[in-house]
Image (cartoon, helix red, strand yellow):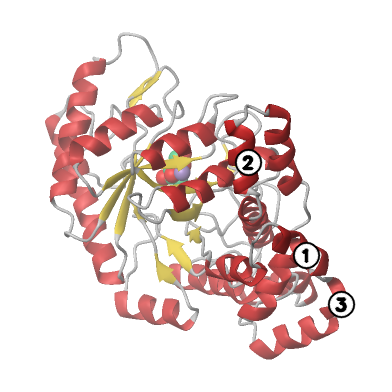
Amino acid sequence: MKITKDQIFDFNDKNKSSYENDFLNKKLQSQGKNMDEIIQKIIDFQVAIPSWALGAGGTRFGRFSFGGEPSSLEQKLEDIGLIHALTKTAGAVSLHIPWDIPEDIQAIKDIALDNGILFDAMNSNTFQDQPNAKESYKYGSLNSINQASREYAVEHNIEVVKIGEKLGSKSLTVWLADGASFPGQINFQKALYNTEDSLKTIYGNMPEDWKLFIEYKPYEPNFYSTTIQDWGTSFMLANACGDRAYTLVDLGHHLPNTNIEQIVATLMMKGKLGGFHFNDSKYGDDDLTVGAIKPYNLFLIFNELVYGMEQNKHNPYPAWMIDASHNIKDPLEDLIQSLEAILIAYAQALIVDRKALEIAQLENDTVTCQEILQDAYRTDVRGLLKAARVQSGAAIDPLKAYRSFNVRKELINERGTKVVATGL
Ligand code: LRH
Ligand code: MN
């Protein structure tokens, strides 16, 4: 299925009355800000879609299929193409290997190009044993006391980099389930030493222009210890590997009430923030729609990102990726909602009156500091997103367009209801 430019144009024509930015323009001018520059930043903000989140997700308690799910990488790229046609914000895919091994590299590159999709970070998988695997990851991979398992896992990561090179990707994300579920099960120091040593080997085998993203997580699937449990451990390992190794922040990988925006500020100040896995959560690594539970936290994180992107030029432009799992919603609608929430938080952070905030902070005028931040957060910036979409050739209201084009019905007609997509 394809969505044509004409369909988008007709849709926008019918829905053109739904926004005006005059009030916002006056407000921004009073702060010496240029609205068109902000709209251009929104247009340029591209988020990678995870190849493992285009079908219905599930938990150990069950999975409810959605119908019309993609059964191949080709179909997954087509679905990302649909989201990108509607939003012009999903111009990249993040592949997970071996869930989405490209059989025919050239064919995959052609489909991606045809849909305006680039290949962002590759993801390795040493948290599942593949059929006929020579070694098991049951008791760990890069941290394993079993040298053969470590070497097998290192080999897999090097293999993933090779696949990524052929596709034009320039980064590898390593997330490790490695750890323990019971006290005494592992020696913490040996586990960390082995992990550091293995990561250094992987880093040493990456092309000179590649980045390594080290993703941390406090628990699950291990429920007592995770070797790369927090930002500090990831930061330490990134420093041990080298200049092109960074920390990746998955929003769902924090214990309750963790101040994630402060972690972001710290990593950017140290030039070690590599990228994000955006999602939202109430309790654990729930992988819910971005901004569905804690939108103010997301705004505070983008507030630090915008400040950091202005102040910390030594930190590379972060990799923006979604990492979610769709147990209830239509996967494509869920991703469209996540993209909207990400752009809203970004736009709100772009309109923060930073000069006034700095003055209020210098004067310890705490009340005014909060007023300035919440003024931006309480400002409806959706008109800026709509202006950005009209300019970029996207649908003025992607979710409404998705439904008015009956995309899911079309996909079910094409693919049936029984297909199960690979991934989480
Ligand atoms: C681990 C994680 C990681 C991926 C996986 C699909 O929880 O966030 O980023 O490998 O989800
Ligand atoms: Mn993740």
Measure how far apart labels 2 and 3 are at the Cα level.
35 Å
Residue 96 at what x, y percent from top left?
39, 54
Nearer mark to the viewer, of 2 and 3: 2
Which comes before the other along the chain, label 3 or label 1? 3
- Quadrant position of the N terminus in the picture: bottom right
Residue 175, above or below 418: above
Residue 399 visible in the current orientation: no
Q: Residues within 10 Å of mark 1 (few under 14, many from 20)?
A: some
Quarter of the image where one finds residue 343: bottom right
Q: Is mark 2 within 8 Å of ligand 2?
A: no
Identify the residue at horizontal 46%, vertical 73% (top origin).
Answer: 117
Residue 162 at what x, y percent from top left?
21, 62
Residue 251 at what x, y percent from top left?
53, 39
Residue nearest the viewer, comparing 383 with 113: 383
Identify the residue at horizontal 42%, vertical 80% (top origin).
Answer: 113
| Left or right of residue 304: residue 143 | left
Identify the residue at horizontal 30%, vertical 56% (top origin).
Answer: 171
Measure how far apart labels 3 and 1 are at the Cα level.
20 Å
Residue position for label 2: 357
Residue 172, above or below 362: below
Residue type, label 2: Leu
Residue position for label 1: 26
Residue nearest the viewer, comparing 374 with 54: 374
Residue position for label 3: 17
Label 3: state its secondary structure.
Answer: helix
Label 1: state its secondary structure.
Answer: helix
| Left or right of residue 279: residue 181 | left
Residue 247 at what x, y percent from top left?
36, 41
Residue type, label 3: Ser
Q: Residues within 10 Å of mark 3 (few under 14, many from 20)?
A: few
